[in-house]
Amino acid sequence: MYKSERMMKAIGDISDDKIEKASRALGYHKDRRHTARISIRMGRLMSIAAVAVLLLALGAVAYAANFFGLRELYANPNRGDMPEEAADLIVSEGAEVKGDGWSANVQETYCDEGTVLVTVHVSADASYIVVPTDAELDSQLSALGLPEEGTLREYARDEEKTLLFVGANLDREALGLTSTGERFENASPQEMTIYVEGARGSSTDAPIDTICTVVAVAWSSETQDPDTLAPERRELPITLVEGKSTPLGLYTPADPCSLPGFELGELSLTQTPLGIELRLKMKTLDEETARNLLTLRLDGVEFHGAGTIDPNGYAVFTQGQGDFGDSPIIQFLDWNKNTIAKVSFEKTE
């Protein structure tokens, strides 16, 4: 069903009590971090257009749940919107699992040589309040985007509901991930979208059959010790296919031992749909000296994805934007962000 059809069906199903609930919800949603800020003044009578805008803003019904999709959650002020080339590779998923009073489904996935993106939608019945796993019992209600004063613990007691802490994990080994991160967006106290971004240290041309594991931990006001709670785990099967990437060149360092404590190897630069990917072979020669290294920078390029350094493997940085020229130059920084080495590379192919 197309979005417009879903929207019209949603509008037709709206009752007065749903409008009232949506109006209350909008009061907190428009203040939610990272989300679109939409202000709507509602009178006793609402036009269909106003209802449609409200539904799109809230994601308050199932038909508008895709409002928090990969395109929307990927974008931020630093890296801007998702490139159209990458957006065209987003795959809609349908895998769904059910827990005790809650359910989760994979909405969309994206994969290229250096990055994996996944969105998971979680919904629960009225007895729950769905909470991000990066929140704690004494976190403020702003963790859900609520403007009221108080903590999640107090809110659950007042509402006589159970807090459901939910997160999502990818299979690091199957996907060759070097790091992962999560971001959470609540459309309502019973609905949340989890955005998972992983950086890959290896790639494959073949489709990857893997899983996304949803972990949920329930806490009620009767529970005394949160550490004794048993988590529910549910596995969502997904198949990822890498988007096409273009090699930009292979390079060798002018002086392989110019970075104290290391021997530098081949540098590979690749254009992925999300931007430039850097892979640099490294070998530790002196562990004590090697500990001084914090990160690296490629002159002319700003990386917006995850960056990781394996001191006896590869440094991998993704989603770069810019121009590195004919002879790439990499600056290596210590923990005080001071340059400890500046190495030039020459193209070999």
Image: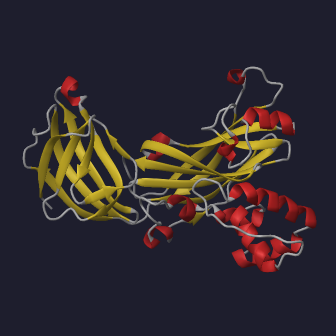
Q: Residue at x 68, y 31 (%)?
A: 138
Q: How is the image coloured?
A: secondary structure
Tell whether 91 sits left or right of 285: right
Q: Does residue 151 lie above or below 322 as drawn?
A: above
The answer to which image quadrant residue 285 occupies is top left
Q: Residue furthest right?
A: 16
The answer to which image quadrant residue 78 occupies is bottom left
State the quadrant of the N terminus: bottom right
Q: Residue at x 50, y 71 (%)?
A: 88
State the quadrant of the C terminus: bottom left
Q: Residue at x 32, y 47 (%)?
A: 316
- How many marks are shown on the rendered structure? 0
Q: Residue at x 81, y 61 (%)?
A: 22
Residue 101 visible in this rendered orientation of the protein: yes
Tell whether 98 sits left or right of 277: right
Tell whether 94 sits left or right of 341: right
Give how far across and how far down residue 155 sits, in percent.
Answer: 79, 38
Q: Does residue 246 lie above or below 180 as drawn?
A: below
**Viewer-proximal residue among 92 and 3:** 3
**Viewer-proximal residue among 320 and 30:** 30
Q: Does residue 142 lie above or below 68 as drawn?
A: above
Give how far across and how far down residue 130 sits, in percent.
Answer: 73, 44
Tell whether 185 sits left or right of 299: right
Give how far across and how far down residue 154 sits, in percent.
Answer: 78, 33
